[in-house]
Amino acid sequence: MNCRTVSVFMVLTFITLTAGVSVEPRCRCSGVESRRVGKMIKSVEVFPPSPHCTHTEIIATLKGNGQQICLNTKAPWVIQVIEKIIANHSP
């Protein structure tokens, strides 16, 4: 094989391997909100640690505008909200 054939093979291999790879950040949250927004929350999603993101992420959707914000998992008021959600969904 000559150098040109090897180069073409390498480029095609690279394109094939990277075709399905996402360029999105691994974690959903780049920053977190610590201020109290409990009364403005419409819904909450909790994402446990995974191979893509090593920490728990809590994303709240706000009433009114539907904006999504990431909550500080260490903030006492956030912990209380999560505990209340768990208690309400327990059998």
Image (cartoon, rainbow, N blue to C red):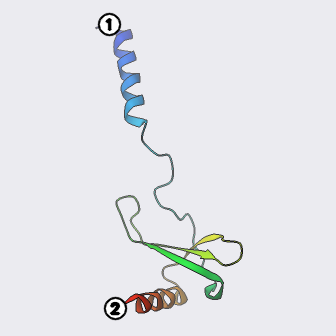
Q: Which residue is mark 2?
A: 91
Number of other residues with Cα within 10 Å of mark 2, as a class: few under 14, some 14 to 19, many 20 or more: few
User: Pointer 2 and pointer 1: residues touching (CB < 8 Å)?
Assistant: no
Amino acid identity at mark 2? Pro
Quarter of the image that includes the N terminus: top left
Quarter of the image that includes the C terminus: bottom left
Task: Give me the residue at 39% from left, 58% from top.
Answer: 52
Which picture quadrant has residue 21? top left
Amino acid identity at mark 1? Asn
Number of other residues with Cα within 10 Å of mark 1, as a class: few under 14, some 14 to 19, many 20 or more: few
Residue 2: image tag: 1
Q: CA distance from mark 2 to mark 1?
A: 68 Å
Residue 79: image tag: none
SS category of the residue bearing label 1: loop
Between 5 and 63, the one nearer to me in the picture? 63
Q: Residue 32: where, in percent of width, then height?
A: 57, 72
Between 45 and 18, the one nearer to me in the picture? 45
SS category of the residue bearing label 2: loop
In the current view of this chain or complex, which residue is farthest to the front? 91
In the current view of this chain or complex, which residue is farthest to the left? 1
Q: Residue 17: where, in percent of width, then height?
A: 37, 34
Task: Judge whether 11 appears above or below 29 on screen.
Answer: above
Task: Give me the residue at 61% from left, 87% from top.
Answer: 38
Q: Residue 35: where, in percent of width, then height?
A: 64, 83
Task: Give me the residue at 51% from left, 88% from top.
Answer: 81
Could you tell which of marks 2 and 1 lies nearer the N-terminus?
1
Closer to us: mark 2 or mark 1? 2
Which picture quadrant has residue 90? bottom left
Which picture quadrant has residue 68? bottom right
How many numbered marks does the figure carry?
Answer: 2
